[in-house]
Amino acid sequence: MAMSKCRVCKEREAEWSWQPFGPAEDSRETFTVPGWHYRGFAVIPVCDQCKKRIQAGATVQFDYKRTTYTCIDDEVWGIRRVSELVPKER
Ligand SMILES: [Zn+2]
């Protein structure tokens, strides 16, 4: 199975499936090996270093479905990217 890039640093190969939207109540807790994630929750591929940063409480950002999310402590906040707004036709 081809590994994807880490969705947090966008540099290293992802080694973990992070599920910040659940099922764990604390967004920093749900990491599984790829292929073994919990069904029904979004999967964010992350590398080992970013996993450690997240678990250490670092504030990280990732993109998912045209939205940029920031994980601050145990909560995830989403901001729709302004760059994706379509300008009006002239
Ligand atoms: Zn990373």
Image (cartoon, rainbow, N blue to C red):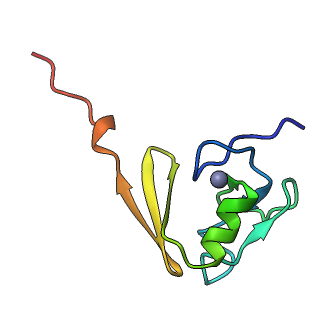
Q: Is residue 34 left or right of residue 60?
A: right
Q: Residue furthest left?
A: 90
Q: Position of residue 72 (x, y in %)?
A: 46, 75
Q: Position of residue 66 (x, y in %)?
A: 44, 44
In the displayed structure, 26 sits above or below 64; it is below
Q: Is residue 4 left or right of residue 53?
A: right
Q: Is residue 21 visible?
A: yes
Q: How many marks?
A: 0
Name the residue rendered at 45%, 59% in the picture.
Answer: 69
Q: Quadrant of residue 18?
A: bottom right
Q: Is residue 82 left or right of residue 13?
A: left
Q: Is residue 41 visible?
A: no
Name the residue rendered at 78%, 58% in the picture.
Answer: 16
Q: Position of residue 43 (x, y in %)?
A: 68, 56
In the displayed structure, 7 sits above or below 72; it is above
Name the residue rendered at 76%, 68% in the picture.
Answer: 31
Q: Is residue 36 left or right of residue 38?
A: right
Name the residue rendered at 69%, 78% in the picture.
Answer: 29
Quarter of the image containing the C terminus?
top left
Q: Position of residue 34 (x, y in %)?
A: 84, 54
Quarter of the image containing the N terminus?
top right
> Front-most of 69 and 50?
50
In the displayed structure, 71 sits above or below 74; it is above
